[in-house]
Amino acid sequence: MLGITEGMIVQELGWDDDVSDEIRDSIEEACGDALIDEDTDEVVDAVILWWRDGDGDLVDELMDVIAPLGEDGFIWVLSPKTGTPGYVEPSEIAESAPTAGLTQTSTVNLGAWTGARLVQPRAKAGKRQ
């Protein structure tokens, strides 16, 4: 569902007691390995960012998250669903993404969490001379 496949290196940020173990387990099962925390020097294929209202500045966080992300990598911003504690307005994510140099491509309902998929825009191929 999240586009995570066997062999991908997936980094997890923003973990706290309220995250969904079911979502985490399904991601680990899909990639075939444990999620990597923020203290990694590896290039990652995907980032799972658990984000709640009050966690800080989303643009700043997204700009930090881009650093270890591979060229074809993507970010899932997971936030509590509408009406629950920590709920983040979808417009906050949609407006933060372009400011951080990202594009939102899709959203998904994950039970108690909602996910927004963000990618880095592809560079346009230059004309050959």
Image: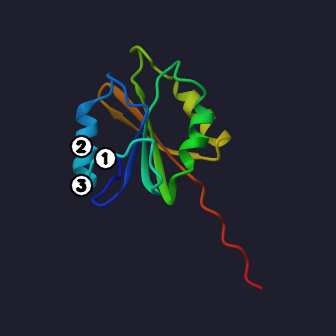
Q: Position of residue 39 (x, y in %)?
A: 45, 43
Q: CA distance from mark 3 to mark 2?
A: 10 Å
Kind of residue at disc 1: Met
Q: Which residue is mark 1?
A: 1
Query: Helix, strand or loop at disc 1?
Result: loop
Neighbourhood count class around disc 3 (C-alpha, 10 Å): few under 14, some 14–19, many 20 upward:
some
* Residue position marked by numbered label 2 in the rendering: 26
Residue 33 shown left or right of residue 43 in the figure: left
The residue at the far right in this view is 129
C-alpha distance separating marks 3 and 1: 15 Å
Front-lying residue, 124 or 17? 17
Q: Amino acid at mark 2?
A: Ser
Q: Secondary structure at mark 3?
A: loop
Measured from the top left, where is residue 42 in percent x and y?
45, 56
Position of residue 103 in the picture relative to residue 110 (left or right): right
- Of residue 40 and residue 114, the one placed in the foreground of this image is 40
The label on residue 64 is none
**Residue type at tag 3:** Gly
| Residue 24 spot, x, y in % from top left | 28, 38
Q: Residue furthest bottom?
A: 129
